[in-house]
Image (cartoon, grey):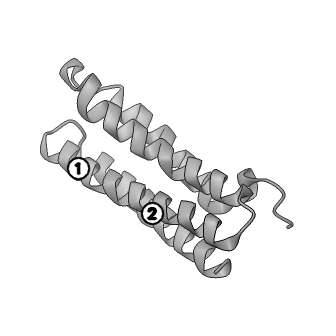
Amino acid sequence: MQIQSFKDIIAWQKAHQLVLQIYGYTDKFPKSEVFGLVSQMRRCSVSIPSNIAEGFKRKSTNDSLHFYNISQGSLEELRYQLLLSKDLKYITEDEYKIAEILADEVGKLIYSWIKAHH
């Protein structure tokens, strides 16, 4: 299949699923975290597919790779925030494991996408 849009990129599709998952999880966080952890987790989760999309439209390989690398950094930031959320008991162990599995998959897909376009 020819990739015509960022929406055709599997890494973007899985990253979008991760964003939706994070929004669902953070809806249940304490109100005291709305401007703290909730905002931070939502912002960095959205950064992952957003930077894939932006990188896709860049004209040079180096520009594209820059945005894909930002996406990887945002993913790692989110992984810590998920761990913190679990330790603070804002999400369950099972929710954490589900998110970690998806985050692992997203990370591998972004890495493969970068390798294919390097």
In the depicted structure, whether residue 94 falls above or below residue 29? below
Mark 2 residue type: Gln
User: Between 74 and 90, which is closer to the camera in this rendering?
Assistant: 74
Q: Which mark is residue 78?
A: none
Quadrant in the rendering for residue 79: bottom left
Looking at this view, name the residue that lies furthest to the top.
31
User: Between 45 and 17, which is closer to the camera in this rendering?
Assistant: 45
Residue sitting at 64 percent across and 52 percent down? 54
Residue sitting at 68 percent across and 72 percent down? 61
Give the side of residue 58 with respect to residue 1, left or right: left
Residue sitting at 40 percent across and 54 percent down? 74
User: Between 99 and 15, which is closer to the camera in this rendering?
Assistant: 15
CA–CA distance in space, label 1 to label 2: 24 Å
In the depicted structure, whether residue 118 falls above or below residue 66? below
Residue 19 pos. (x, y %): 49, 42
Looking at this view, name the residue that lies furthest to the left.
88
Q: Residues within 10 Å of mark 2 (few under 14, many from 20)?
A: many
Mark 1 residue type: Glu
Residue 15 pos. (x, y %): 54, 52
Q: Quadrant of the C terminus?
A: bottom right
Q: Residues within 10 Å of mark 1 (few under 14, many from 20)?
A: some
Q: Which mark is residue 72?
A: 2
Q: Quadrant of the N terminus?
A: bottom right
Give the side of residue 102 with respect to residue 37, left or right: right
**Considering only order in the chain, which callout, 2 or 1, is on the residue closer to the N terminus?**
2
Mark 1 lies on a secondary structure that is: helix
Residue 57 pos. (x, y %): 73, 56
Mark 2 lies on a secondary structure that is: helix
Residue named by callout 1: 93
